[in-house]
Image (tube, grey):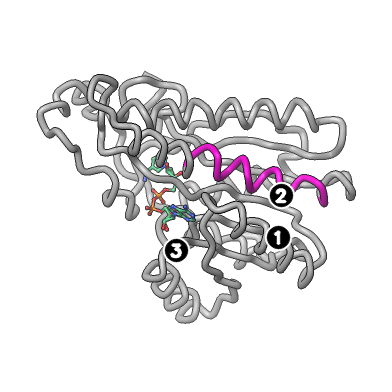
Amino acid sequence: MDTTRHAGRVVIVTGAGYGIGRGTALRFAREGATVIGIDVSDEGLALARAEFDSAGVKVDLRKADITSQADVDRLFVDVIGTHGRVDVLANVAGIMDHFVVAADVDDATWNRVMDVNVTGPMRMIRAALPGMLERKAGAIVNVASVGGFKGGTAGVAYTTSKHAVVGLTRNTAWVYAKQGIRCNAVCPGGVQTNIGTSSAPRDPSIMAVFAPIHGAVNGMAQPDDIASLISWLASDEARNVNGAIVADDGGWSAG
Ligand SMILES: NC(=O)c1ccc[n+]([C@@H]2O[C@H](COP(=O)([O-])OP(=O)(O)OC[C@H]3O[C@@H](n4cnc5c(N)ncnc54)[C@H](O)[C@@H]3O)[C@@H](O)[C@H]2O)c1
């Protein structure tokens, strides 16, 4: 690990309480960045704080809900006020959809998954862009999923939301490419995290439909396996990488 890779940078990581977001906040901090990690979960924030403290790593953890425009506005006012800028935005927070399929999906599930997985990242990008455009520099990394380009990994809301994250990523990359801003997405396969809280199938019998794809998963990754790619995409080493949708799945989606 290069402890100076992100030295001097201000990085916001969403979903920093658990899983990939926590691992990403930890990695950026170890690589020299000033990290602001946000999460909606008090429990997740407390557990992350305990892990960062015991690792001797400084991360500014704050409670914020990416589905609340007021929370996002307040966050950016605070961060810009304290640190002057945001160099990197890692949109990691996301939820699953209990494998609910199209015939069964209720509006509440659909809207909640879209709000957290799509509208939340859009809100964060919209808030980060003015400062990035002013400085003609910035890196955004969105966490999509193998479900962002394959149809058989999750329910209809999650699959649709992650396909939308791919569109959000490519459109942002194209529109702002000439203004020094890069936007890429990582697509994890199976990762050992806390996402099981929204993964329990509402109708267990439906899992037979997903079995052929799930059965081909090539092992479970750890959060840092994804964090390392997020960090690289945000780094100067990836300066020519923009609009890329990069699988980080041990080869699962290659078959
Ligand atoms: N774990 C996997 O196998 C896997 C696979 C592919 C993609 N992903 C994606 O990776 C990302 C991270 O998921 P994870 O597996 O680490 O799950 P996780 O549940 O461990 O972490 C997600 C974090 O996001 C937070 N969060 C949820 N809603 C939020 C909101 N409204 N505002 C702020 N924070 C919020 C949660 O509290 C949690 O800390 C997600 O976008 C997920 O879709 C995960």
Q: Earlier in the sequence, mark 3 or mark 1?
A: 3
Q: Amino acid at mark 1?
A: Phe
- The answer to whether 70 appears left or right of 252 in the picture is right
Q: Quadrant of residue 238?
A: top right
Q: Amino acid at mark 3?
A: Gly
| Label 3 Cα crowd, 10 Å radius (few <14 / some 14-19 / many 20+) | many
Is the CB of the residue bearing disc 2 within 8 angstroms of ligand 1? no
Looking at marks 1 and 2 on the same chain, the residue that comes earlier in the sequence is marked by: 1
Percent coordinates x, y for residue 74 in the rendering? 66, 63
Q: Which of the image's four quarters has the N terminus?
A: bottom right
Q: Which mark is residue 17?
A: 3
Question: Magenta segment, principal secondary structure?
Answer: helix
Q: Is residue 229 left or right of residue 180?
A: left
Q: Disc number at residue 127?
A: 2
Q: Contact (CB < 8 A) between labels 3 and 2?
A: no
Which residue position is annotated with label 1? Answer: 76
Q: Which portion, as a residue range, is magenta?
A: 117-131
| Mark 3 or mark 1, whichever is nearer to me | 1
User: In the rendered structure, are the residues bearing label 1 and label 2 in contact, judged by CB atoms less than 8 Å apart?
Assistant: yes
Q: Earlier in the sequence, mark 3 or mark 2?
A: 3
On screen, residue 104 above or below 86 = above
From the viewer's side, name the closer residue of 204 and 127. 127
Q: Position of residue 209 (x, y in %)?
A: 19, 21
| Depicted 34 relative to depicted 194: above or below | below
